[in-house]
Amino acid sequence: MKNQVQLITYVDRLGGCRDGRDLARLKRLLSEPSAPLAGVFGGVHLLPFFHAIDGADAGFDPIDHTQVDPRLGGWADIKALTEDLDVMGDVIVNHMSSESPQFLDYSEKGEASAYAGLFLTLDAVFPQGASERELLSVYRPRPGLPLTYATLQSGERRILWTTFTAAQIDIAVHHPQGRAYLASILRTFADNGIRMVRLDAVGYAIKKAGDSCFMMPETFEFIGEFAAEARALGIEVLVEIHAYFQRQIEIAARVDWVYDFALPPLVLHAFNFRTAAALKRWIAIRPTNALTVLDTHDGIGIIDIGANASDRAAHPGLVPPEELDELVERIHAASQGQSRKATGAAASNLDLYQVNCTFFDAMGRDETAYLLARAIQFFLPGVPQVYYVGLLAGHNDMDLLARSQVGRDINRHYYGEAEIARDCARPVVRRLIELIKLRNRHPAFGGEFRVEPGGDQELYLRWQQGNAWAALRIDFATQSHELSYSDTAGAPQAFAFS
């Protein structure tokens, strides 16, 4: 994987119109010399492009994980995209759609189905029955139990394991059918040029009676086995986990790549509380095999910098709980209350530990602060990813939220081609693109990173490789800042944030 900034996007929400040519349009947008985003990114994470992209969870509930939704294009289009860019795809390891052929066969035939052991039922995990204590010990950052009572078409009544929604049926990943299913996804991806996969919801993939059923030793064993299969096909693996920050460090030591999910709330904390102290503490211990993000298709994580819910006194967060609560309120205030309408118990939310808001609106649409936040992201060790709405400094889509009543849709706007061209002409977007190009092309970012000494209010980051260097200074108390770097002759240059 190139050490260059990557784009995160839905295929149909960035210039698409679901006419079968959306993937081809995306390739032109990112590669055609006259296009506004040509040559900006080294890679692209394609959010679910499988059949179907408009299920119960925006494609994260695949009916057929090995088929490209024909409204976007086909596998030939994916392969063509990989000619110019590193391409990442999602492997949804925990579940599949209740509309999948496998589940429909199971529903019709019950225990006579060839897929009977593929789908987890309550008694598959608790063959002796489950006590209240055991059920309450199952970790789930959503309200209620991860179970759904269902009457199959065969007339059988079962209690199905459904970690996320009733339309997403958990699979038995160690069952022969489960192994074959996941292996077929990897083979299809490899055959079509995808060289990196994100394991979606993998932390929940293994269930064990009497345990939390989240990131257990058995889960790590499964991740290791799956990653070995992927590597044999030339595919790198990214593990997506929202968890207590110490847990994330432990996970990172055992996998190829993780997200730095602590970074977005810590950057917001630094600007809101005018201190770099918590951010610098994290930089000192954070894993470097990380994809750095400020925004994704989900909300802004809070759990990632808070205390460990199982023992808050013994395992405090990166910021005090009162400041974490205040940070959430300040995001709501910065967004003029829009994020409140999309977060928590509002708008059919399933994830209670995330604030749904575009990152630009979470920063009060302050263009200079927003670009400084991106500079921090790009200066930290790891591979940066920029979400398509964040790339275009997008605003909260209140119309889409009103139509869908899904909180995360506030940050999942559909951009037409004319809107993309118009937004790319905005000064804040032009400067962000310039910043991305600097991060991709300057040789210093392939060298040595260090944090220079300074007070709690100051952040001073520096990269050096030979005579090439790049430095970022921010004083959060005064908002004074400087991004400087060497040109090819070694002379200092300054990046203009405004």
Image (spheres, rainbow, N blue to C red):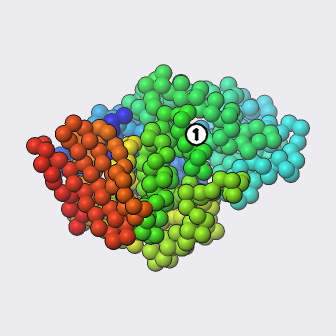
| Quadrant of image for the C terminus | bottom left
Q: Residue at x 43, y 65 (%)?
A: 275
In this view, the residue in front, 376 or 318, is 318
Q: Residue at x 60, y 51 (%)?
A: 244
The mark total stands at 1
Q: Residues within 10 Å of mark 1 (few under 14, many from 20)?
A: few
In this view, the residue in front, 222 or 9, is 222
Would you say residue 221 is visible in this rendering? yes
Residue matched to label 1:
250
* Residue 334 appears left or right of 424: right
* Residue 130 in the image, given as x and y percentages of width and height: 86, 45
* Residue 84 appears left or right of 18: left
* Residue 51 in the image, given as x and y percentages of width and height: 51, 43
Would you say residue 424 is visible in this rendering? no
Above/below status of 424 relative to 35:
below
Above/below status of 385 relative to 334:
above
Q: Residue at x 68, y 43 (%)?
A: 214
Q: Secondary structure at mark 1?
A: helix
- Residue with the most extreme left position: 489
* Residue 269 in the image, given as x and y percentages of width and height: 47, 65
* Residue 20 in the image, given as x and y percentages of width and height: 38, 46
In this view, the residue in front, 290 or 271, is 271
Query: Within the image, what quadrant is residue 152 found in?
Result: top right
Query: Within the image, what quadrant is residue 407 found in?
Result: bottom right
Q: Residue at x 45, y 31 (%)?
A: 236
Q: Name the amino acid, label 1.
A: Glu
